[in-house]
Amino acid sequence: RPAAADEGPPPPSPTLSPAENASSSSSSHPNGSRRRLPQILIIGVRKGGTRALIEMLSLHGAVAAAQNEVHFFDWESHFQKGLSWYLSQMPYAFPDQLTVEKTPAYFTSSKVPKRVHEMNPDMNRGSAYNPSRLPGGRQRPSGGPITR
Ligand SMILES: Nc1ncnc2c1ncn2[C@@H]1O[C@H](COP(=O)(O)OS(=O)(=O)O)[C@@H](OP(=O)(O)O)[C@H]1O
């Protein structure tokens, strides 16, 4: 899907080191999409409606959602596989899409915050969110109500 002409560059997204990239089983899709590490994580809590949340988010054209709970940051057996494996679990996404993963158990493991921060120090700042990049380019007035 081509990006709109008035869109700026894609939001910054975590990248792998050359070594990790080389060992990654993922690759660019012929249609121009690529797997990316998530810019958005849905963290807990179990039975808090996280499945409903990610399903609703995935209805938006600017969102590419992982289908399964990946348990990368909380399960040692997964974490030891490295970021290249985590990347391989992500959906293909176009340049103007944000990748989102949800694993409610990230809420209950004390190792998770540091690991997420090491993957992407900007994850907790909402830096990936820029309403002007969304289809239509609407930006909510500062402090104003959300309008439709
Ligand atoms: N809007 C709303 N209102 C009330 N209940 C809701 C809502 N959305 C999701 N649900 C119920 O939440 C349960 C699933 O939550 P999660 O997706 O967080 O589950 S999980 O922890 O990821 O397994 C699941 O309940 P159970 O079927 O009892 O497990 C959903 O039916």
Image: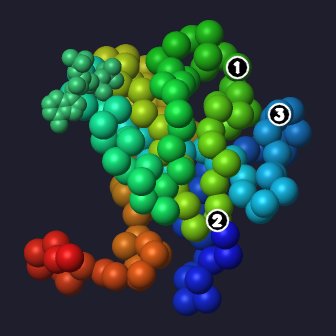
Is label 2 in a helix, a strand or a loop? loop
Residue 54, position in %: x, y? Answer: 38, 41
Residue type at mark 2 is: Pro
Crowd around label 3: few <14 · some 14–19 · many ≥20 (10 Å): few
Q: Name the residue under label 1.
A: 81
Residue 31: mark: none
Residue 102, position in %: x, y? Answer: 42, 33
Q: Name the residue under label 2.
A: 95
Q: Mark 3 points at which residue?
A: 25
Is 49 located above or below residue 105 in the figure? below
Is 131 located above or below residue 138 in the figure? above
In what quadrant of the picture does the C terminus appear?
bottom left
Residue type at mark 1 is: Lys
Crowd around label 1: few <14 · some 14–19 · many ≥20 (10 Å): few
Mark 1 / mark 2, whichever is N-terminal: 1
Residue type at mark 3 is: Ser
Camera-nearest residue between 78 and 90? 90
Please tell me which residue is depicted at 42% across the width and 27% down the height of the picture: 103
Question: Farthest top residue?
Answer: 77
- Which dot, 1 or 2, sits closer to the camera? 2
Please tell me which residue is depicted at 37% across the width and 57% down the height of the picture: 126
Mark 3 / mark 2, whichever is N-terminal: 3
Residue at mark 3 to residue at mark 1: CA–CA distance: 12 Å
Q: Is residue 17 left or right of residue 6?
A: right
* Colour scheme employed for the rendering of this structure: rainbow
Q: In this view, does 100 lie to the left or right of 88?
A: left
Crowd around label 2: few <14 · some 14–19 · many ≥20 (10 Å): some
Residue 66, position in %: x, y? Answer: 54, 38
